[in-house]
Amino acid sequence: MANPGDSSGFRCGGRMFAASEIALICEVVATCRGLSRKERANTISELVGWTRANGSLKEPECLMLLARLEAQGLLRLPANSRGDRSDQSLRFRTRPRANRACR
């Protein structure tokens, strides 16, 4: 992976993001703080043209990109709102739920 701060960009989800796109993403995160993470990911995907062949936005990949950019210290995501559970796909369950039988 390239260093996110250099001119070669930042790779995530099969795409290389230019430094100008990372700057745009950081600006959206800073200025659109009232959006849920899902809405923010869809907005960013639309702005940078990150879509699948069928035209749908790459929301899960964008959520992962945002998490990676935050981990690199390039941006700070607002805390999740109480009802926003769009980042659950980024969590890994280590144990099955107690009320479910293991198969």
Image (cartoon, rainbow, N blue to C red):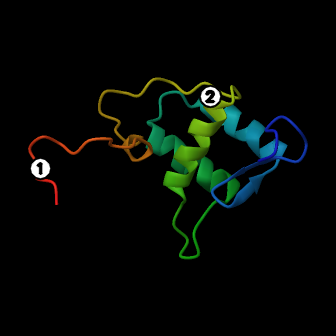
**Residue 73 drawn at (x, y percent):** 68, 25
Mark 2 secondary-structure assignment: helix
> Residue 60 versus residue 27: which sits nearer the camera?
60
Quarter of the rendering containing residue 32: top right
Residue at the extreme bottom: 54
Q: In the image, 95: left or right of 56?
A: left
Tell me: residue 44, above or below residue 103.
Answer: above
Quarter of the rendering containing residue 70: top right
**Residue 102 drawn at (x, y percent):** 16, 54
Task: Give the CA separation, mark 1 to mark 2.
Answer: 42 Å
Sequence-wise first label, 1 or 2: 2
Residue appearing at x 22%, y 45% in the figure? 96
Residue appearing at x 71%, y 29% in the figure? 74
**Residue 4 drawn at (x, y percent):** 79, 38
Residue appearing at x 75%, y 41% in the figure? 22
Neighbor class of circle 2 (other Cα within 10 Å; few <14, some 14-19, many 20+) is: few
Tell me: residue 5, above or below residue 21.
Answer: above
> Residue 20 versus residue 65: which sits nearer the camera?
65
Numbered label attached to residue 8:
none
Residue at the extreme front: 103
Neighbor class of circle 1 (other Cα within 10 Å; few <14, some 14-19, many 20+) is: few
Q: In the image, 23: left or right of 80?
A: right
| Residue at numbered disc 1 | 100
| Residue at numbered disc 2 | 31
**Residue kind at label 1, given as amino acid type:** Arg
**Residue 88 drawn at (x, y percent):** 37, 42
